[in-house]
């Protein structure tokens, strides 16, 4: 529910603070008094586009703030947008500076105009005299019908199958593209794979090969140096190991006289052991050193091939990965029909499920549309449109061929029918206000007053189904009068028992039923123009309704008529 609206420096408004209550709130005033500016301010704070032209005082900023009671739907939306929640309240504010800078807030947290608009769509349903987009835009009909339906599980099943089918189509198209590309590049992949298979690179082979080549190219020098080391370690009387063994014997004798020598004796034994291991390694290595010019040339050629691959692919790792890729592409090309058959069979199994859920949803909607059609016609007849005929249609087109994969088989023929995210085919609202005239699309045949009554009928049906708290009607009663206006007022009053309604009207039959009544006045004194808005109390409401009945010449008779209008029975 809308709790309050604060407006500062907005077009003709200096400062206004309005407090609202449940039920039906009516705004009246002289023609040209600026009644619609109130709604313009609400639309502004809910994210509509604007410019600095709205600044009444070009030196100060415009501020519009609106507060609503919250509910679980709004709280969930705020949570998903990471806003702090106020207990039971949501506050939206929008400011515009003289420099054209906009600032937006949700519960005092800075945000964007787009977010204000998103939240506003969950709070307010706005209907102007020529602003019935939700009723005249066929793309909204599916969501409108589904909001009334109690068969939610059918819609959920269809949506789940549709998403799965979409993914299946995308996978098939991707696989077809990959196979087509693999076929086109088959010769190229074969050539590259042949080169990689002939060389057959191994991870780390360049490093190992270069180390081996260095050993082979320097075999003579290695042999001489290892022989020299071995001789110095052990092969003559002056070599290291025999000399150390002699010293070690002396230490063995010395430690008998002084234990201090014992530790050094142990360390000397360890040194001798290490040198013996070193000697064994050098001797073994020396025996294996063998120079072969043939082996050197073979290794050099191998390394040249490996370096060529590394330069071509960046590294041997990449070359090996590419080999696997080329092989997989050739396998795909060779097994293309088998691969495609698997994906097509999988897609057809999903299509079968989608077909069943699409037609189940279609039939469920058909039943619901007939019920809606009956309810709206009954209400329109009660609203004085006794010859009106409102028809809800649902149909789909079939074709022998579809370029897109997004189709299912028609249950009644061998043809195909297209599908979309909302289901099968399309929904349309047809209307005729005169007997003997075939109903045509509502948007093309209904007048403003007729659309207003159709919209009221629809809103009366969906009032219990959606979570929107506030309905705003901006002079939607244009084109009606007399007893019809009274009946429209009764329907609005009945609807206000389920939804908060704020409406601008010129009709006394509607204004008399207000739970809260505001009057807008324009002041043009002192060469300036401004508007104010007052909440009427007690007898003031009868006086304002009487003015709507008889103009400025308010009489006792018009006051009595106003009282009678206010006490009219709500059942008709």
Image (spheres, rainbow, N blue to C red):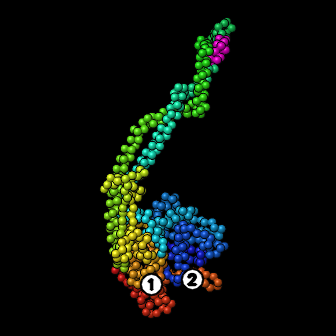
Quadrant containing the C terminus is: bottom left
Expressed as whole percent of the image width and height from the top left, the position of residue 471 reads 45, 72
Whether residue 382 appears in this view of the structure is: no
Asked if residue 251 is among those painted magenta in the image, a careful observer would answer no
**Residue that numbered label 2 is attached to:** 522
Q: Residue furthest bottom?
A: 556
Quarter residue 136 falls in? bottom left
Residues in magenta, as a range: 215-228
| Front residue (pair 453, 220) | 453
**Residue that numbered label 1 is attached to:** 508
Expressed as whole percent of the image width and height from the top left, the position of residue 217 reads 64, 17
Task: Tell me the crowding category of disc 1: few under 14, some 14 to 19, or many 20 or more residues within 10 angstroms, Cα based.
Answer: many
Quarter residue 395 falls in? bottom left
Residue at (58, 33) in percent of width and height: 313
Residue at (60, 71) in percent of width and height: 62
Expressed as whole percent of the image width and height from the top left, the position of residue 186 reads 49, 35
| Front residue (pair 548, 397) | 397
Asked if residue 224 is among those painted magenta in the image, a careful observer would answer yes
Q: Is residue 451 left or right of residue 282?
A: left
Expressed as whole percent of the image width and height from the top left, the position of residue 260 reads 65, 17
Q: Secondary structure at mark 1?
A: helix
Residue at (48, 61) in percent of width and height: 77
């Amino acid at each position: 529910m809308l709790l309050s609206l604060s407006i500062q420096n907005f077009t003709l408004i200096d400062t206004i603070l309005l407090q609202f209550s449940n039920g039906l709130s009516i705004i009246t005033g002289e023609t040209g008094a600026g009644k619609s500016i109130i709604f313009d301010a609400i639309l502004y704070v809910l994210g509509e586009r604007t410019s600095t032209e709205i600044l009444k005082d070009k030196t100060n900023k415009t501020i519009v703030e609106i507060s609503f009671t919250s509910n679980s739907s709004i709280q969930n939306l705020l949570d998903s947008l990471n806003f702090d929640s106020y207990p039971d309240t949501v506050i939206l504010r929008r400011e515009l500076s003289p420099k054209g800078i906009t600032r937006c807030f949700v519960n005092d947290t800075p945000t964007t105009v787009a977010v204000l608009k998103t939240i506003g769509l969950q709070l307010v349903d706005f209907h102007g005299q020529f602003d019935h987009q939700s009723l005249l835009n066929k793309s909204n009909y599916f969501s409108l019908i589904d909001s009334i339906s109690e068969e939610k599980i059918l819609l959920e099943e269809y949506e789940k199958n549709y998403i799965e089918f979409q993914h299946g189509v995308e996978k098939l198209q991707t696989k077809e593209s990959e196979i087509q590309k693999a076929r086109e590049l088959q010769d190229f992949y074969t050539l590259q794979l042949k080169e990689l298979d002939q060389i057959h690179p191994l991870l780390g082979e360049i490093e190992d090969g270069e180390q081996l080549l260095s050993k082979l190219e320097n075999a003579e020098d290695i042999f001489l140096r290892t022989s020299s080391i071995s001789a110095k370690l052990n092969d003559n009387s002056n070599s290291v190991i025999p000399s150390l063994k002699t010293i070690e014997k002396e230490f063995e004798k010395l430690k008998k006289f002084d234990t201090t020598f014992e530790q050094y004796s142990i360390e000397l034994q360890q040194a001798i052991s290490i040198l013996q291991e070193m000697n064994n390694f050098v001797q073994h290595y020396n025996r294996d050193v063998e120079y072969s010019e043939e082996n050197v040339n073979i290794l050099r050629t191998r390394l040249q091939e490996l370096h060529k691959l590394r330069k071509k692919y960046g590294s041997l790792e990449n070359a090996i990965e590419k080999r696997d890729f080329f092989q997989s592409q050739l396998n795909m090309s060779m097994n293309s029909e088998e691969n495609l058959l698997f994906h097509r069979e999988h897609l057809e199994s999903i299509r079968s499920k989608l077909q069943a859920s699409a037609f189940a949803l279609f039939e469920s909607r058909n039943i619901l549309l007939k019920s809606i059609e009956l309810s709206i016609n009954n209400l329109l007849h009660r609203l004085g449109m006794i010859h009106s005929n409102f028809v809800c249609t649902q149909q789909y087109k079939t074709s022998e061929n579809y370029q897109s994969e997004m189709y299912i088989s028609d249950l009644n023929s061998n043809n195909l029918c297209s599908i979309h995210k909302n289901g099968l085919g399309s929904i349309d609202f047809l209307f005729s206000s005169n007997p003997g005239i075939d109903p045509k699309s509502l948007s093309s045949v209904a007048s403003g007053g007729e659309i207003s009554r159709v919209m009221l009928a629809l809103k009366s049906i969906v009032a219990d189904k959606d979570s929107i708290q506030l309905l705003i009607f901006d002079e939607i009663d244009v084109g009606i009068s007399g007893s019809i206006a009274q009946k429209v007022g009764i329907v609005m009053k009945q609807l206000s028992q389920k939804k908060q309604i704020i409406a601008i009207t010129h009709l006394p039959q509607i204004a008399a039923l207000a739970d809260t009544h505001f009057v807008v006045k324009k002041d043009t004194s002192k060469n300036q123009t401004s508007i104010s808005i007052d909440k009427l109390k007690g007898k003031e409401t009868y006086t304002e309704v009487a003015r709507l009945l008889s103009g400025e010449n308010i009489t006792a008779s018009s006051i009595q008529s106003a009282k009678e209008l206010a006490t009219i029975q709500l059942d008709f």
